Amino acid sequence: MAQRTFSHQLILLAVAAALIAGLFLLPKVIVKPKEGKGELAQDAAKTATRDGGGPNTNGSKAVASSGEQEQTANGPSLEQPHMSVAPAQRREINALTAQYTAERDPVAKLRIAGNLADKYKAAEKFDSAGYFLEQVAQARPGEQTWKRAADAYFEAFSFATTQERQKTLGTKCQELYGKVLKNNPENLDAKTNLGMAFMASENPVQGVVLLREVLVADPRNEKAIYNLGLLSMQSNQYDKAVERFRELTKVNPENVNGQFYLGVALAQTGANDAAKVAFQKAKSLSTDPGLTAAVDEQLQKLQ
């Protein structure tokens, strides 16, 4: 489980190779790098909200939870499960879907909705999981039920392959995390994810404001520091990104993501020797072959 959580947090930034993780357990694939600071910044913009991948995506956004399903006005189509779901999983989902549709007892229906959410999460169809978790939250509103639904939609948002889907799912995240924070304004994880969801909206400044609010409340919040570092790279502020990732690695020297992206940011500022140290540190902290390949390629370029 620890390896799963670790790997899911690796973000694909095509500077050299994709950090492909198996996680949050995935098969590994290497993506050829794009050259130049402009393309680096574009990739950071596209992937800054993403925490990782899954076995069906090979850790990339090429196949995403939010991209292969048919939708109805009320959510995922119950009649058309994801065609990419494995046959055994599809049969389980079909059976539960039939039960959900036929069930008239509200308590039993909520139980089936929870089971469906679990099955969709296992298949890494996070928007479908979010839909059913939202049904549960509407019947049993509270900080935790709303957050489970919001987190599932945030997973789907993180995988979104088109700007339209990212905006749609980001809007849903804003709605549900808003309900979480209404119940508990001090939920910093919800506030951080809400901030990232705003980055895909017409009001990205609000996202930065929220992330900074998180750091005011918790200056050592690794997730907020990390995302602000990525956003600095998105806007070509590599010196600022170096500051953020240095801060992150001081808070937690074993943060693999922080060490790797510190190396990326340092390389972009021309501090090649310092970048090599950061890359080697990242490599020493992980046995993930995707990370190893990415680091080795970066080190080769810095020779």
Image: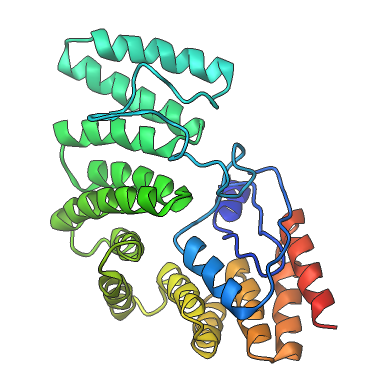
Position of residue 82 measured from the top left corner of the image (x, y, whole percent): 47, 26
Q: Is residue 300 above or below residue 57?
A: below
Q: Residue at x 69, y 73 (%)?
A: 35
Q: Is residue 167 left or right of residue 158?
A: left
Position of residue 114 measured from the top left corner of the image (x, y, whole percent): 32, 27
Locate the N terminus and report the quarter of the image it occupies. Answer: top right
Q: Residue at x 78, y 61 (%)?
A: 293
Q: Is residue 184 left or right of residue 15?
A: left
Residue in the foreground of this view, choosing between 97 and 36: 36
Position of residue 147 measured from the top left corner of the image (x, y, whole percent): 28, 47
Tell me how the rendering is colored.
rainbow
Residue in the foreground of this view, choosing between 88 and 80: 80
User: To which quarter of the image does residue 208 belong?
Assistant: bottom left
Residue in the foreground of this view, choosing between 36 and 272: 36
Q: Is residue 2 left or right of residue 75?
A: right
Q: Is residue 124 above or below residue 299?
A: above
Locate the C terminus and report the quarter of the image it occupies. Answer: bottom right
Q: Residue at x 72, y 75 (%)?
A: 279
Can residue 288 be seen here? The reply is: no
Q: Is residue 38 left or right of residue 285?
A: left
